[in-house]
Image (cartoon, rainbow, N blue to C red):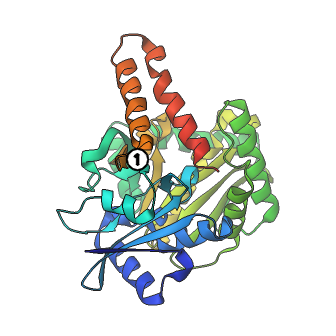
Amino acid sequence: MQIDVLRPTELSPAMAASWRALQREGRGWDSPFLSPCWARSVDMARHGRGVRVAVVSDRGEPRAFMSASVGAVTAVAAGGAMSDYEGLVGDPGPDFDPAALVRALGVSRYDFSHVPADQAAFAPHARGQALSWIIDLPAGYAPYAAQRRAAGVSALKELDRKRRKVEREVGETVFTAGSTCRTDFDRLIALKRAQYRLTCQTDVLGVAWTRRLMEGLFTLRSPDFGGALFTLHIGGALAAAQFHLMGETTIHAWMIAHDPALERYSPGLLLFQDILRWMDAQPYDRLDLGYGDYRFKTELANVTTPLIHGFVGRPSPAALLREAAYGVRRAAEALPLGKVSELPGKAMRRLDLMRGLR
């Protein structure tokens, strides 16, 4: 087994094609975040700084690919805080040790946050788990809606009621898929940054390279990868906007925001409903809502994918430090202190998020 580490721009067309072919072999690999195009887009946004691709080969044949953002001591997912999925695409074999990836990348530690739990190589290194919430529509919107009703979920019926109400009280709803309106794109960015400030979250769009990434994806026009802007106007004004990553058959919900003045009509959810209906005539049959136990995700999703977080390290001070941090986190979470017990975990996640934006 051999591991070569390349810049995304050094991948040959044959290698990129092999990577895409591996993505098609497993449904869990279809995420646009696991695409060679994602690694290339992040590399361009970061002006070639730190993004690398590890190619695992057996007798000259690529078996698996993994992209990462590599620093002097540690590595994280390519795109860091902007990425919702990471890990290997392909199967390097049952005896593969991910510590070999750490050595090949030239770092002491690889910190992962969103690796699918079925990746056997990373499972022994997991320190916790979360769920990614997915809407699967293999037969289209109508059967999906019937399935949700049968499961006792009234969210879609409630959205139909809110749509009628907002059209009576505010004005006509107009849905646009794949919008090229620059004004609406800029408005989405402004709304999202205001939302981060209001909720005291880290502003991931306050860094130059993340905005360049968004800009590049907004202008990218490709049949199997890119960003797509979806908008909902009500009474002629922008009510909600969502910018999603597009794979070959999967859409990943990414940046979503709405006009707070229309909050009671749930314009963001109305836009999600429009996207789901639009997908009937498109090659997409899955909308991944990402991780986070928000009510709208639990109500709309009909499939979940477990994601694990943890780290793979070589014997080093960096690995010892990370292990100690997880030790403090485990000890705190074992104490019956309510939300106080969650503070070390929240601090770790906040620091990792900020580190992933550097």
Residue at (75% x, 59% y) in the render? 185
Do we see residue 137 in this rendering? no
Residue 135 x/y as whole percent: 41, 53
The quarter holding residue 86 reads: bottom left
Residue 93 vs 97, above or below: the answer is below
Per the image, label 1 sits on a secondary structure element best described as: strand
The quarter holding residue 199 reads: top right
Quadrant (top left/top right/bottom left/bottom right) for the N terminus: bottom left
Using the image as rendered, state which of residue 335 and residue 302 is in the foreground.
335
Using the image as rendered, state which of residue 195 and residue 40 is in the foreground.
40
Residue 314 vs 349, above or below: the answer is below
Do we see residue 296 in this rendering? yes
Residue at (37% x, 54% y) in the render? 144
Residue at (68% x, 35% y) in the render? 263
Q: Which residue in the protein does label 1 denote? A: 132
Using the image as rendered, state which of residue 34 and residue 270 is in the foreground.
34
With 181 as the anchor, is 147 left or right in this view?
Answer: left
Residue 142 x/y as whole percent: 40, 57
Residue at (64% x, 70% y) in the render? 48
The quarter holding residue 208 reads: bottom right
Using the image as rendered, state which of residue 327 and residue 193 is in the foreground.
327
Neighbour class for label 1 at 10 Å: few (<14), some, many (≥20)? many
